[in-house]
Image: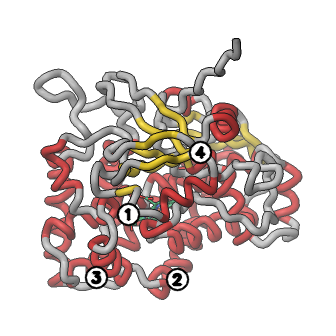
């Protein structure tokens, strides 16, 4: 009798707090490239119908590129099904639309996001990184030689860069942080869920939970119409967007531009802290920082999955996928697929080509990738200037989330 090995579980958000389940991903890629996953009740969140996990690089790219068969619109883009009553509301966001309609909002928002505008932020980002790293170094020097890079540098760096770009007053960065945490960190015990009248947690993406943020976006847009600035919200306030579309675009940028960079920045430092040889080579200029940033993004993908919904019955790797089934692509698995990346668990700062999917692919490929890359390049350049070699002083605290590869703390020891 042949014993069929069980399909590893990659759904449980608690797994990810212990580290990304790379062994399970490999097992899935090798034996079950399209694998059914149970969506059981977890952390107080009710059970769902289950989903297909897609883990090979070629299949992840195929799903992301084929928006006709794999829709972002039918069931939106999170594993957890939204309340059907909330679907029309959630679909106001470009993330949850399909071509050709998606193209209209995408074009309008990208106009606000010109490379020239983003490039103008390089000087501000450099000054900010320099100041934060200088203060972090002083903290370590005056203390026991260690510093929490998340608290001292990366959270503040990402948040303030985003407030600059959006045109949000820097003093309101705490609001941005609170809103994004509510949406992204909702599985983490540090962010207790808001309970509805029936005692079950309220979906953080539902209209009730977003009203405060929307009110803020409306007021800020009105202010920008009177007092325009060189920022994204000024462009959105003057674009041909309905109020609902403007509010949703603000929400999308606030969330998409925040936890992703707040993951990538410490994630890159963590990778380098664990690889002293590579850290030294980078410091000696043996790799271009831009090439190294791509490898750090491959090695520590900030986004762990996105969901699509099958728009038609079809067969994928001999599995019958039915119309309406959820199909979930796993970016960290695709980035470590040995079919594409030789020696995928080696940090190779000169890796080229490096077709990682950390920014996704297809029509929804990250709109903020240029801005994110700029922030990461500047941060690493400034780290090389301002910090001595560093290593981890204690294991990082990871976010309980199967969506964002978040670090809540990263204690580093500065070695000189
Ligand atoms: C390292 C940082 C980042 C990573 C890893 C990342 C990753 C991603 C991924 C994987 C998607 C595709 C979603 C899908 O397939 O449905 C996406 C979309 C998007 N990202 Fe990013 N992102 C980052 C930073 C940013 C920043 C800084 C912004 C803006 C301030 C931003 C704005 C967006 C927007 C607006 C979309 C939706 C595009 C659409 O639906 O057409 N992202 N991002």
Where is mark 1, residue-wise? 68
* SS at mark 1 in the image: loop
Q: Which of pointers 4 and 1 indicates the residue nearer the eye?
A: 1
Q: Nearer the viewer, mark 1 or mark 3?
A: 1
Mark 1 and mark 3: span between their CA atoms? 30 Å
**Few, some or many residues within 10 Å of mark 4 (<14, 14–19, 20+):** many
Instruction: Give the camera-side residue of 194 and 3.
Output: 3
- Upstream in sequence: badge 4 or badge 1: 4
Q: Residues within 10 Å of mark 2 (few under 14, many from 20)?
A: some
Q: Nearer the viewer, residue 45 or 143?
A: 45
Sequence-first tag of 1 and 3: 1
Q: Residues within 10 Å of mark 3 (few under 14, many from 20)?
A: many
Residue under the image location 21 percent in, 25 percent down: 200
Relative image position of residue 390 (x, y in whole percent):
77, 48
Which of the two discs, 1 and 2, sits closer to the camera?
1
| Label located before the other in sequence (3 or 2) | 2
Q: Which mark is residue 119?
A: 2
Q: How is the image coloured?
A: secondary structure
| Residue 20 visible here | no
Quarter for ligand 1? bottom left
Residue indicated by mark 3: 235
| C-alpha distance separating marks 3 and 2 | 16 Å
Identified at 34% across, 61% down, the residue is 95
- Identified at 56% across, 39% down, the residue is 409
Estimate the x, y position of residue 230 in percent, counting from the top left. Answer: 34, 84
Circle nearer the viewer, 4 or 3: 4
- Give the secondary structure at mark 4: loop
From mark 4 to mark 3, how far is it between C-alphas? 38 Å
Residue wearing tag 4: 55
Q: Which of the two residues, 124 or 5, is positioned nearer the viewer here? A: 5
Q: Do the numbered discs 4 and 3 sit on residues whose CB atoms are within 8 Å?
A: no
Neighbourhood count class around disc 1 (C-alpha, 10 Å): few under 14, some 14–19, many 20 upward: some
């Amino acid at each position: 009798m042949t014993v069929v090995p069980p399909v590893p579980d990659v759904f449980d958000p608690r797994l990810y707090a212990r580290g990304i389940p790379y062994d399970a991903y490999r097992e899935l890629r090798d034996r079950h490239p399209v694998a059914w996953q149970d969506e059981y009740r977890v952390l107080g969140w009710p059970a769902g119908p289950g989903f297909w996990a897609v883990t090979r690089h070629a299949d992840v790219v195929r799903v992301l590129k084929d928006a006709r068969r794999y829709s972002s619109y039918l069931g939106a883009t999170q594993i957890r099904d939204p309340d059907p009553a909330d679907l029309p509301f959630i679909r106001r966001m470009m993330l949850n639309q399909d071509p050709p309609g998606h193209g209209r909002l995408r074009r309008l928002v990208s106009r606000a996001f010109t490379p020239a505008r983003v490039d103008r932020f390089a000087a501000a980002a450099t000054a900010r990184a320099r100041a934060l790293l200088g203060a972090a170094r002083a903290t370590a020097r005056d203390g026991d030689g260690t510093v929490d890079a998340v608290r001292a540098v990366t959270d503040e760096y990402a948040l303030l860069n985003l407030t600059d770009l959006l045109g949000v007053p820097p003093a309101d960065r705490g609001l941005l942080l609170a809103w994004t945490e509510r949406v992204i960190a909702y599985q983490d015990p540090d962010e207790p869920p808001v309970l509805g009248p029936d005692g079950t947690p309220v979906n953080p993406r539902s209209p009730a939970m977003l009203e405060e943020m929307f009110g803020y976006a409306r007021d800020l847009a009105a202010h920008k119409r009177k007092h325009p600035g060189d920022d994204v919200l000024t462009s959105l306030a003057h674009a041909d967007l309905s109020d609902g579309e403007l509010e949703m675009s603000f929400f999308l940028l606030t969330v998409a531009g925040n936890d992703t960079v707040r993951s990538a920045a410490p994630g890159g430092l963590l990778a380098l802290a664990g690889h002293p040889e590579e850290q030294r080579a980078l410091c000696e200029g043996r790799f271009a920082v831009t090439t190294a940033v791509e490898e750090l993004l491959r090695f520590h993908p900030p986004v762990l999955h996105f969901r699509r919904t099958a728009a038609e019955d079809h067969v994928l790797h001999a599995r019958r996928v039915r119309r309406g089934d959820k199909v979930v692509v796993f970016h960290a698995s695709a980035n470590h697929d040995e079919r594409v990346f030789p020696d995928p668990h080696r940090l190779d700062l000169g890796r080229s080509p490096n077709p990682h999917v950390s920014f996704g692919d297809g029509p929804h490929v990250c709109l903020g990738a240029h801005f994110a890359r700029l922030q990461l390049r500047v941060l690493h350049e400034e780290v090389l200037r301002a910090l001595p070699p560093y290593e981890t002083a204690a294991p990082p605290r990871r976010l309980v989330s199967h969506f964002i590869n978040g670090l809540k703390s990263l204690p580093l020891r500065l070695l000189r």
